[in-house]
Amino acid sequence: MTRIATAPNEQGTSGNAVEVHGIVKHYGETKALDGVDLTVRQGTVLGVLGPNGAGKTTLVRILSTLIKPDAGTAFVGGYDVLRQPKQLRRTIGLTGQYASVDEMLSGYENLYLIGRLLDLSRQEARSRATELLERFSLTEAAKRIAKTYSGGMRRRLDLAASMIGRPRVLYLDEPTTGLDPRTRNEVWDEVQRMVAEGATVLLTTQYMEEAEQLAHELTVIDRGKVIASGGVAELKAQVGGQTLQVRPAHPADLPEMARCLREHGIPVATFSTDTGLLSVPLTGEEQLTAVVGVLGTRGFAIAGIDTLVPSLDEVFLAITGKPAAPADAPGADATPATLAKEPVA
């Protein structure tokens, strides 16, 4: 039985735009979500990461009132997803994994129609449609019917439609899959512009660069459970932190440099004659200073020094045990049907 809680006031009481507690969803024997908890602070971007089938799209469908959870509670903009779906829909925008536009209408007509359904005035709907067509490089195709658009153009039109009403909370479910780098950057710019204006974004993605570019915090889901959460730097620190790499001017000095560091209480130094690098895992700034100081005091000539942190791809692999999906692979999820975008009227 679904548990229903009393909704807070419209503005919310916690400073969170989205609050999810113990959400469960089954599809037959498949448990798509298994007690998910997460929060999204107002005016921020939460990146939701996870391998294909992790449950990301199921979560988005629940938070956009397209499906009901089997258990748990969720509030968006202060509205209960079960008890106040109509009010909630007026505060959100949604872009699913696949573009969904009216192919018999022009690009401009698609956006104007969505604007009017969202109660924009005729003038405001026209102005907003024109503005977003320009932002997504669709002005020249504005009067063409959407069925003549390329896949990338449809995707950009779909994204524009989700943003036309300036939603308080925007769901982007793998929004830049299949987009070229320039268009992807345009989408990122628009998301950052909306957040700067006060919007909140829940972003599911398998592009690690996208998560680093946009997300203030990350939640990692696997097999329907939240297995990690925190800021990008925080998750990277959990995996292993920084490594100092020193390149001596004379590669023959590598063994002696490592021995010298061990004598000064830094036993974790290793070197590779193939790369010509000395590597030291760092536990803090003090250790970095100590390594450089010891090598300098002993008179070793150093050609270069660099500090490395694990990439978000490495973090993803370490946490989930699986690599992120290829950049051109469409996302799949543990749901019986593709998420279709619906106007939030």
Image (spheres, rainbow, N blue to C red):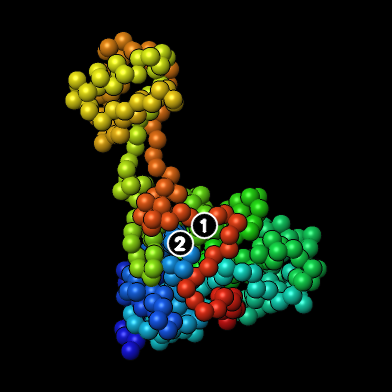
The label on residue 325 is 1
- The residue identified by callout 2 is 51
Residue 95: horizontal and vertical position, in percent? 57, 69
At horizontal 66% and vertical 62% (from top left) the residue drawn is 156
At horizontal 39% and vertical 64% (from top left) the residue drawn is 221
Residue 182: horizontal and vertical position, in percent? 65, 50
Examine the rendered structure and indicate whether residue 155 appears above or below residue 283. below
Tag 1: residue type? Ala
Tag 2: residue type? Pro
At horizontal 57% and vertical 54% (from top left) the residue drawn is 327
Looking at the picture, tell me which residue is in the foreground, 14 or 61.
61
Locate the C terminus and report the quarter of the image it occupies: bottom right
Examine the rendered structure and indicate whether residue 209 appears above or below residue 19. above
Quarter of the image for residue 138 reads bottom right
Q: Marks 1 and 2: in contact by CB < 8 Å?
A: yes
Looking at the picture, tell me which residue is in the foreground, 26 or 344.
26
At horizontal 29% and vertical 16% (from top left) the residue drawn is 256
Q: Label 1: few (<14), some or many (≥20) within 10 Å?
A: some
Locate the N terminus and report the quarter of the image it occupies: bottom left
